[in-house]
Image (cartoon, grey):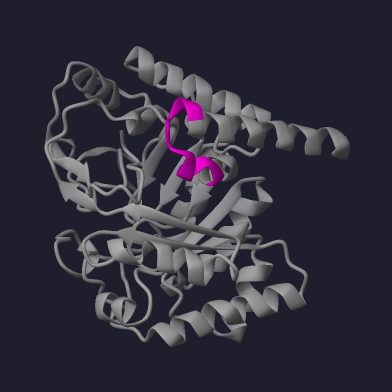
Amino acid sequence: MKIFSQADNKIARRIAGLAAKYYLGKPDVSELLQIKTPTISSVINAAINELFFRLGLEHGYKLTTVNIEITNHCNIKCKMCPVSGKMQRQKGFMSFSLFKKIIDENPQIEFILPFQWGEPLLHKDIFEMVKYAALKGIRVMLTSNGTLLNAEICNKIIDSGLLRITFSVDGVGDTYTRIRGVEYSALKNNILLLKKIRDERKSSLKIDISMVVFEDTEQQVERLFSEWKPLVDRVQVIPVFTQIERKTKCRELWRGIVVVLWDGRVTVCCADYDGSMIYGDANEERLIDIWNGQQMRKLRREHRQGKFSGACKNCGEYESSKVSKRFQ
């Protein structure tokens, strides 16, 4: 059975790599697709969701992924982040009971990211949340700014069952410090501490680095890869959201993912930082019912017709030859 599983994973990785390079035309997202679709079944689900997108159907095939915003509080203020500027909605922390309800009522979920906006390590129940989902057989990844790491937290991360943790490192050296208001050397030491403890404990936890590409960081892409690639398991860059008129339908509506804000309200996309396009409430409904509910079907129909409203109307991404766009 183990041999079959290894072969299954190898084939899935190969398919994901080919899809990124030849179908999407984005070879730089190959590794990310391999992480998100590690099995043949997950590849099939993603392929059918993509087919529904191509056909412009009003319903999606299968909801497999949830971004769960366990908090939108953050301990730092980054130059390009709406949390410390544009965000108008109330800040808070998701209850552990709501988190468990989401997991329990949606057994089809394969992958969760307990993060959307804010710093998840501020949540007092973060490690219990990760453990709860992992024990249900769900793959869990986390994104963090890395500033709260110490030996105790590093060990809790490893013990939680987390598969991967991604640290946001927007710029190198003084650029990072100017953007995030934190000393770059302190952040780097924190990440290296986690790596040291992970290696000493022979943990399978993967450590990734991610940088948002915009005017201040675009010229540091090569330096970021050069400095961090020898140190961590993966380095990625993503474009910052920009206000550009949308002209084509977005595959995010079909991709098998929803975003649950800390208070349980469900929005369609991570770009909707203020929760202006709410399509349901996880306190009252199952996510699968929201994802294929009347409002979502109406939104897909509008996208198919080239009609874009709300957060979708001016949803764009920074233009750069150094990074692929995510929502095309």
- Residue 89 appears in which quarter of the rendering? bottom left
Q: Position of residue 10 (x, y in %)?
A: 73, 36
- Chain part drawn in magenta: 22-31
Residue at coordinates 14% horizontally, 60% vertically from top-left?
A: 88
Q: Position of residue 124 (x, y in %)?
A: 47, 73
Residue at coordinates 55% horizontally, 85% vertically from top-left?
A: 150
Residue 295 visible to the viewer: yes
The reply to whether the magenta stretch includes residue 301 is no
Q: Decide which of 237, 77 is in the foreground and name it.
A: 237
Q: Decide which of 285, 70 is in the foreground and name it.
A: 70
Residue at coordinates 44% horizontally, 70% vertically from top-left?
A: 123
Residue 286 visible to the viewer: no
Q: Decide which of 134, 53 is in the foreground and name it.
A: 53
Q: Main secondary structure of the magenta part?
A: helix
Q: Is residue 165 left or right of residue 119?
A: right
**Dividing the image into 4 quarters, which one contains the C terminus?**
top left
Q: Position of residue 84 (x, y in %)?
A: 20, 70
**Dividing the image into 4 quarters, which one contains the N terminus?**
top right
Where 297 falls versus 232 (above or below)? above
Residue at coordinates 71% horizontally, 31% vertically from top-left?
A: 11
